[in-house]
Amino acid sequence: MRKLLLPILLVLLALPVWAQASILVFTAERGESFQVKVNGRTLNHTASNYVRMNAVRPGEHYIELRVRSRHGVYKMGQKVFVPHGVEASYGVRTLGRSGKAHLKLLSEVPLRPVVVVPAPPLPRYPDHHRHDAYCGHDRYDDRYDDRYKDDRYRDDYNDGNCRNLLSGRELERAIDAIRNRDFESTKLSIARDALHGNSIMADDLKRLLQQFDHESTRVEFAKYAYDYLCDRDRFYYIYDLFRHDSSVRELEEYARRRR
């Protein structure tokens, strides 16, 4: 019986790894803008120098590239094999003036499960006051919630977008978790988890965006976070983080469509 327990235990420990999908990352080695199709599906309709595809099934995939450079437009089609449970990074290269491009495998790093530590519950305090017409029970006592001592959380933002507002402590925990990760895709996953079921202020969103290295990731997360933004009229606070005017225009257009 004991001999059977060890193989079963090993299988159970390996299940989270087997269940984890892979990630494909494409980066232009010289900074050129490009568009990617995977198995006929376009990943980025707006050309960029960094593209990531999450939840990639293992096996063979057909990659099509359209690269823009000072020499013109380069095109290519190439098959790649993606192992299970890895982040596979490919460099996009152009070949002189030939009009051709190709992919070079840079790394295949096993993905580790992200552990999110939940915030401890707020302490409960005993109720010692009397409940009568003079107790003021209908007035909110904010002695035990530091968030409401901040002017950012005043009543003019108390609407449907501001439920479960991300506290300063929760924000710092998310930033620390992101800083401890090397891969842009993992950072993005943690940031999305931090917003799940919460809302966020524009100033705090700006701090989260500063943790990403690539402008395309910042654009992607800014779009994702817009629906969780408490003060959407201040979405423009984040615009100075972007180097390219095209990124700002893309975010402005996205915000107009979401209003």
Image: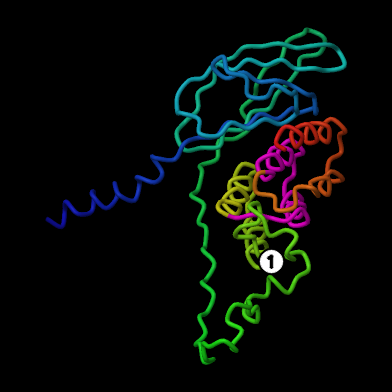
Task: Classify 10 Å Cα crowding around label 1: few (below 14), some (14-19), many (20 and above).
Answer: few
Question: In this view of the protein, which residue sits in the foreground, 254 or 54?
Answer: 254
Instruction: Please report the residue visible at 58 percent of the width from the left and 18 percent of the height from the top.
Output: 41
Q: Is 232 placed left or right of 114 in the picture?
A: right
How far across and how far down the image is residue 74, in percent? 75, 12
232 up-or-down from 137: above or below: above
Q: How many marks?
A: 1
Left or right of 7, for residue 170: right
Query: Residue at (55%, 37%) from the top-left corner?
Result: 87
| Residue at (73, 64) in percent of width and height | 155
Residue 12 falls within the magenta-colored stretch: no
Residue 239 lies, in percent from the top left, at 84, 43
Tell me, yes or no, whether the highlighted magenta stretch contains residue 213: yes
Q: Quadrant of residue 84?
A: top left
Q: Is residue 98 left or right of residue 91?
A: right
Q: Identify whether 130 is placed above or below 230.
A: below
Q: Quadrant of residue 26?
A: top right
In the rendered structure, the answer to whether residue 142 lies left or right of residue 70 reads left
Q: Secondary structure at mark 1?
A: helix
- Is 91 above or below relative to 188? above
Q: Amino acid at mark 1?
A: Gly
Whole-percent x, y for residue 147 in the image: 68, 70
Span of residues in magenta: 198-226
Q: Main secondary structure of the magenta part?
A: helix
Q: Which residue is mark 1?
A: 168
131 or 100, which lies in front? 131
Query: Horizontal and vertical percent for residue 210?
Result: 77, 51
Q: Quadrant of the N terminus?
A: bottom left
169 or 254: nearer the eye?
254
Seen as rendered, the residue at the extreme top is: 98
